[in-house]
Image: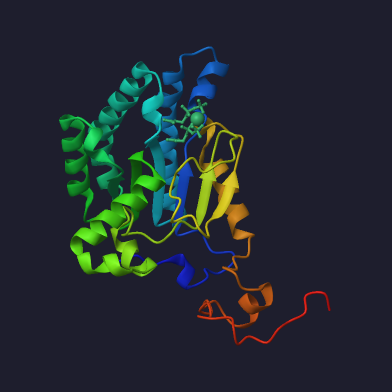
Amino acid sequence: MNTSSTQGIPDTGAVPRHVAIIMDGNGRWATKRFLPRVAGHKRGVESVREAVRACGERGVEYLTLFAFSSENWRRPEEEVSVLMQLFVMVLEQEVAKLDAAGVRLKVVGDLSRFDAKLLELIRRGEAKTAHNTKLTLTICANYGGRWDIMQATHAMLRANPALAAGFTEQDLEPYLSMGYAPEPDLFIRTGGEQRVSNFLIWQLAYTELYFTDTFWPDFDGRALDEAIASYRRRERRFGQTSEQVRERGRAVTPVPETHAAAPATRVDA
Ligand code: IPE
Ligand code: IPE
Ligand code: MG
């Protein structure tokens, strides 16, 4: 069941429960070294290993990595093909190690465009690691935030046609592809761009954003620590004032149904 972060405010200074990363800058990392772009993707796999290890050590419970967006099919055919081969190779080589480290693997996205071999590896990887509890590693593959909201809406209405008359956020959330996880506390994008690129657009509503110029292949445990340290210095307020957060504890006050009866406050007073 989805435990929305917006139901309660995590303590300032706490380690983020859920870290979501746009692993960007592989191509530029390679180009800077006069290497083909795919060399950057290959080196990026090292950083994935490092991020999984470091998150496990630091007590992060959910790590979500954007590996391939629904828009990345627009890339040259050869690059897409190498990325798919890399995905197959990583699944073949890493699942046993992930399992030994207590990591539960999930792959989310529109998997219908992947070939049978990749689908079978994903299915087997998820099944083999399903019982693990140390860290949930989610790979977003052929994922798009808008696709997710649309597929969730369709799935919810298929399961419960009466909701066509009207539904709530809570009705929809279990059908989002990451309905098993709390919303991300910390979003990291490497590679210098400051955009969300159709990642978890629903779930990022109140996530703390962190951007770094470091290219993904250079992103190591220390870089992750810097991101986590930045997160821990922030006060999350979810619409409340700083005083409310500090004085009234961390339960979020429900948003009033109507503001009609609220006494008028002069903003120019
Ligand atoms: C991110 O690195 C990896 C994928 C999108 C698969 P890029 O390939 O986007 O690297 P840049 O942004 O071109 O440097
Ligand atoms: C976002 O990176 C997707 C992944 C990291 C998988 P892109 O490099 O594709 O993003 P844009 O197109 O520059 O926004
Ligand atoms: Mg990029």
- Residue 102 at least partly seen: no
Percent x, y of residue 173: 34, 62
Q: Nearer the viewer, residue 38 or 45?
A: 38
Residue 258 sits above or below residue 21 on the image: below
Residue 101, how many percent across, how many down? 31, 48
> Which residue, as the protein is rendered here, is positioned at the far front?
165
**Is 125 left, or right, of 144 in this rendering?**
left
Task: Report the side of 115 relative to 264 (left or right).
Answer: left
Percent coordinates x, y for residue 48 in the rendering: 41, 37
Residue 118 drawn above or below residue 157: above
Residue 40: give x, y in percent of width and height: 46, 23
**Placement of the C terminus among the 4 image quadrants:** bottom right
Q: Is residue 78 above or below residue 120?
A: above
Single out the residue that lies furthest toward the top.
Answer: 34
Quadrant of the frame with the N terminus: bottom left
Q: Is residue 172 visible?
A: yes
- The residue at 49%/23% (across/down) is 27
Foreground pick, 195 / 52:
195
Residue plotted at (77% across, 79% down) = 266
Q: Specify the color scheme.
A: rainbow
Return the residue nearer the eye: 89 or 28: 28
